């Protein structure tokens, strides 16, 4: 979590095809072949129907693989909040190398999912994002966080909060009614250089921006085959640059759009309809 202000509110990988993005390790397992830039928009996949309910009163800690079998997990008791309180606990904490798959997070979802190191979120769905959908907190520059499939709705601010070090890869995801899809922490006490890759993603309005990165810390965001629906006036910013800090102050926005250094994409990589 971060302290800056919030708004109210096909498994096959080719090493050569991913090398340009530096996708290795866990990301190779969950990241499909990069779709060609400028590919025609496809229909947004339907959301799954939850197969049962599971109330969560205490954070579930995951080592190895946790298969939720598409049950709906909702917070209760101390986890029974879907607000913007920074002190909330998550429904799931994933230890280094853990995999969380086939999970529907219902309402309330508290602070969603925390990854303490490299992790994979596969086919995970947030029906109504609480404070954040997932927060990535590993401290190793070699950490890889992979989000493959799934989707999120109703994020009054951020969907994915990137507080730690390493690389975040978001593939075949869908998001609607959100503030930001991914935000590199703008004012954490400990700052890192972060790499973000967003590929083959469907975005539906309303929304503000896809990725926010700190140019002064060397962050990069690479976008490919992003389809933005319902935004013919192109109000959603694909990539926004900030000057981050470690003092807790609100970070300053310095620009948006492709620049070949921090925001790495071309006009053909993002389509609007």
Image: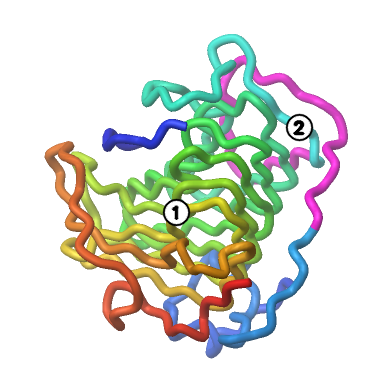
Label 1: element kind:
loop
Q: Position of residue 78 (x, y in %)?
A: 54, 12
Quadrant for residue 17, please give it. bottom right
For label 2, the crowd category at 10 Å Cα-Cα, with few meaning under 14, some 14 to 19 and many 20 or more, is many
Q: Residue at x 33, y 53 (%)?
A: 184
Sequence-earlier tag: 1 or 2: 2
Give percent across and percent down for residue 192: 24, 55
Query: Which residue is depicted at the point 16% across and 63% down?
Result: 216
* Mark 1 → mark 2, Cα distance in angstroms: 28 Å
Asked if residue 68 lies left or right of residue 188, the reply is right
Query: Disc 1 marks which residue?
Result: 208
* Among the 4 quarters of the image, the one containing residue 195: bottom left
Q: Is residue 265 above or below residue 129?
A: below
Mark on residue 72? 2
Residue at the image point whose x is 51% and y is 81% from the top: 269
What percent of the width, then of the height, locates residue 196? Answer: 41, 65
Tell me if residue 131 is in the magenta stretch.
no
Front position among marks 1 and 2: 1
């Amino acid at each position: 979590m971060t302290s800056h202000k919030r708004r109210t509110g096909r498994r096959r990988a080719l090493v050569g095809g991913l090398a340009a993005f530096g996708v290795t390790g866990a990301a190779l397992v969950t990241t499909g072949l990069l779709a060609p830039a400028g590919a025609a928009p496809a229909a947004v996949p339907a959301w799954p129907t939850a197969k049962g309910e599971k109330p969560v009163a205490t954070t579930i800690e995951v080592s190895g693989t946790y298969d939720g079998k598409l049950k709906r997990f909702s917070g209760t008791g101390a986890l029974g909040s879907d607000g913007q309180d920074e002190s909330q606990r998550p429904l799931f904490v994933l230890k280094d190398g853990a995999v969380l798959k086939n999970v529907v997070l219902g309402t309330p979802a508290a602070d969603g999912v925390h990854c303490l190191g490299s992790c994979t979120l596969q086919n995970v769905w947030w029906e109504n994002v609480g404070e954040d959908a997932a927060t990535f907190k590993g401290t190793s520059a070699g950490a890889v966080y992979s989000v493959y499939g799934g989707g999120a709705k109703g994020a009054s601010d951020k969907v994915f909060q990137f507080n730690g070090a390493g690389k975040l890869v978001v593939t075949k995801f869908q998001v609607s009614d959100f503030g930001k899809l991914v935000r590199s922490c703008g004012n954490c006490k400990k700052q890192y250089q972060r790499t973000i890759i967003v590929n083959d993603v469907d975005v539906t309005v309303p929304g503000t921006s896809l990725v926010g990165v700190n140019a002064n810390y060397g962050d990069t965001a690479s976008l490919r085959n992003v389809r933005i629906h319902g935004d013919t006036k192109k109000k959603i910013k694909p990539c926004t640059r900030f000057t981050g800090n470690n003092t807790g102050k609100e970070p300053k926005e310095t620009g948006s759009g492709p620049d070949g250094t921090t925001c790495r994409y071309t006009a053909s990589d993002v389509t609007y309809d």
